[in-house]
Image: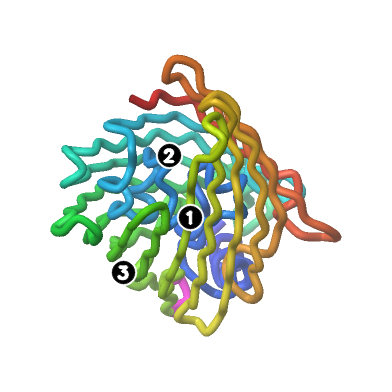
Amino acid sequence: MKRFIILYLTVFLPLYANAQALPFLAMEQSPVAAAKGGASVTETSSTAWASFTNSAAIPFSEMKGDISAGYSCWQPSVGKTNIIRLAGAYNINNKFGVGAGLSYGMMPGYDIYDETGSSNGTFKPSNLMANFGFSWRFIKWLALGGNLGYANEKLAESVSYGAFSTDIFLMTGFKGFKGAVGISNLGTKVTSASGNTYGLPTSLTAGIGYDASFAENHRLDVNLDLDYYFHQAFAAAIGAGYTFKDLVSLRAGYRYGGQSVIPSYASAGIGVKIVGITLDFAYLIASGESPMKNTLNVGLGYRF
C-alpha cells in the first residue's frame, strides 16, 4: 500500500495543476462569480464568499449581511469531486467588514492494494478549506482587507498535507467604478512523500469593475480580473451580469487559464432573489478534453 501511495503522490499529483500544492485554493467558490468567468475580486453584489477572495469588497457592498450555502460538482468529466460550502459576510456601517467560510470536497475513491497485490478496500481523498476575513474602509474610497485560511488535503489514511495562507487586498470604489489589487494564496510550502517541495497557487491579482442602474428597473455590472501566478503563469477572467427589478439576474463570462492551475472555460448562470432569499446557479462550458466542462456551482442564501 505504501508503494501505491508514493506513486500516486509523486507521479500523478505533481502533474496535476502544474506542480502546485493544494490547487483547489484557486477554485472559485461563489456561484455568482463562477457564472461570470470567475471574475471575483471586485464583486460586491454577493459578498458571502469574500473571505475566499477579497474581504476588502465587503464595506463597499450595499448589503448589510450575506450568508450562503453551496454545492459544486467539480470537474465531473475526469472524476467528479463533490464540494459543500458555507460562508457569510457582515458589513459594519460601510466601515468594516468581517467574513468567514468553510469548504469540504470529496474526491473519487481509489482501490488500495498491499505489497502482495491483495485488496485492502478503497479510500476516498478529501480536501478542506476554512478561513476568516476582515476589512477596514479607512477612507471613503479606499479599503484594506485580509483573509487568513487553512487548507488540508487527505490523500490516504496516513498521508495528508496542510498549509496556512493569506490574501491581502486594497480596494477602491467611486460612482460605480471599482478597482482592487492584492496577493492571493500566499502561504507555507508543502513537502511531498518523496521530499519534493511545492508552493501554493500564489498570485498577484488585479481587478476592475463597474455597476450601474438604468431605466429604474435595470442593473448592469461588469468585472475583469488579471492574475499572475508565481509559477510563471497568467490568467484572466471577464464577466457581466444583468439584473431586472432586483429579482432575476443573468450572468455570463470567460476565463483564460493558460498554464495556471484552473484551465480555460466559458460560463453562464442565473440568479433569483425573493424577499432576500437567493438562489444562484453557474454552469461551466469547455471544449475537448478540458476537465472543466459540465462543472456546476449552486448556492442558496439570504441577503439583507
Mark sitting on residue 46: 2
Q: Which residues are magenta?
A: 192-196
Question: Does residue 108 appear in this view?
Answer: no
Magenta stretch contains residue 237 = no
Q: Earlier in the sequence, mark 3 or mark 1?
A: 3
The vertical placement of 270 against 28, above or below, is above
Q: Which residue is mark 1?
A: 210
Question: Does residue 154 appear in this view?
Answer: yes
Q: What residue is shown at x 36% (from left), y 47% (from top)? A: 50
Residue 147 left/right relative to 215: left
Q: Earlier in the sequence, mark 3 or mark 2?
A: 2
User: Looking at this view, is 3 or 175 the one in front?
Assistant: 175
Q: Position of residue 35 (x, y in %)?
A: 62, 45
Q: Quadrant of the C terminus?
A: top left
Q: What residue is shown at x 36% (from left), y 36% (from top)? A: 87
Q: Which residue is mark 3?
A: 187
The amino acid at mark 2 is Ser
Number of disc labels:
3
Q: What residue is shown at x 61% (from left), y 43% (from top)? A: 81
Q: Position of residue 138 (x, y in %)?
A: 14, 58
Q: Position of residue 78 (x, y in %)?
A: 74, 52
- Farthest residue in the right direction? 288
Element carrying mark 1: strand
User: Looking at this view, is 11 or 162 the one in front?
Assistant: 162
The vertical placement of 207 against 65, above or below, is below
Element carrying mark 2: loop
Proximity of marks 2 and 1: CB atoms separated by less than 8 Å: no
Q: Position of residue 175 (x, y in %)?
A: 37, 54
User: Looking at this view, is 146 or 64 the one in front?
Assistant: 64
Q: What residue is shown at x 63% (from left), y 76% (from top)? A: 259
The vertical placement of 97 against 194, above or below, is above
